[in-house]
Amino acid sequence: MDGVGIVGLGHYAPKRVVKNDEIEKQLGLDAGFIEKRTGIRERRWAESDEKLSDMAVSAGEMALAASGMTRADVGLVLLATSTPDHLLPPSAPLVAHRLGLSNAGGIDLAGACAGFLYALVLGDSFARTYRGSVLVISANILSRRINMKETASAVLFADAAGAVLLGPTGRAGTGVISADLKSEGAGYDLIKIAAGGSARPFTPGLAAEDLLMSMADGRAVFQKAVGMMAESSRSALEGAQLGASDVAHFVPHQANSRIVEAVRKDLGIAEGAVLSTIEGFANSSAATIPFTLSYLSESRGFQPGDRVLMCAAGAGMN
């Protein structure tokens, strides 16, 4: 059977650069605290008039242009986001419309930091089954969900978008060759936005903090993320009958540098295989993996046949 290939990559980050010292001053932290704990030096935050759909369209447009494919060939748009333009309707149909993808279906996926991997697996399956192209976009504006009174989340999160265009190829054995998707609902409340859903809907007098992201136990999140990312990575490698030395490029979710390094060491992945953008762009949840793939694609020089290992863990826990 012919395989599936990544035929186009795209990325977008807002123009506004927010350096660590700005946040450290707001939180009363010592200079250098954020970089020491997270590996982040600066991040990008969206302007007040910038919408999630604007960022997703920019990344998608870049991926489409890079592919050289006609828009009529795209049959599906999958948008992995935790910050859609509205709770209803989903943002993917609007993104598809603005990109001129008149033949494409569109749906949002709320998989938190792991959302891109779920969308990638679903997109690969669609492309294999229906021999159509799939535009997978991950985008988030997390700066509007940060609680600046909570250090654990305030220092980490940023805004960005990344996109991959999947399409049928004439090369057998390409595409997703092994995947391991897991959830651990026992950790459901480790990362959350308390209000705004049906369990606790909007009501008059609702505290502003209840509409912002909360990560009360950073240590538990760290341990859970490292364990899940390493375990799923090992399972995927075993499923593909590959070892750590077979990985040409390791693209973990850019949660923070300590999590990335802990997972790398656990798996025995070579330092030179790691792709990272966390220093300059921080943690944009589901967007970090496709953003990093696209942003570093030219300097990295991806080649046909390269094995790429991706892993992520986030709210849910997914």
Image: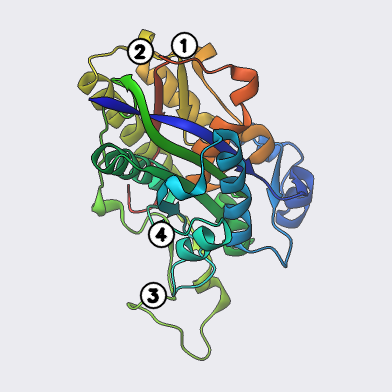
The answer to whether any part of residue 314 appears in the image is no
Label 3 vs 2, first from the N-terminus: 3
Label 1 vs 4, first from the N-terminus: 4
Residue identifier under label 3: 197
- Mark 4 and mark 2: span between their CA atoms? 35 Å
Near mark 2 (Cα within 10 A), the count class, few <14, some 14-19 or many ≥20, is some
Q: Amino acid at mark 2?
A: Ala
* Residue 219, position as x, y percentages in the image: 44, 43
Residue identifier under label 4: 106
Residue identifier under label 2: 244
Label 1 vs 2, first from the N-terminus: 2
Farthest residue, direction top: 245
- Mark 3 and mark 2: span between their CA atoms? 41 Å
- Mark 1 and mark 3: span between their CA atoms? 42 Å
Mark drawn on residue 270:
1
Which quadrant holds residue 140? bottom right
Which quadrant holds residue 199? bottom left
Q: Nearer the viewer, residue 117 or 68?
A: 68
Q: Nearer the viewer, residue 77 or 238?
A: 77
* 79 with respect to 119 (left or right): right
* Residue 243, position as x, y percentages in the image: 30, 11
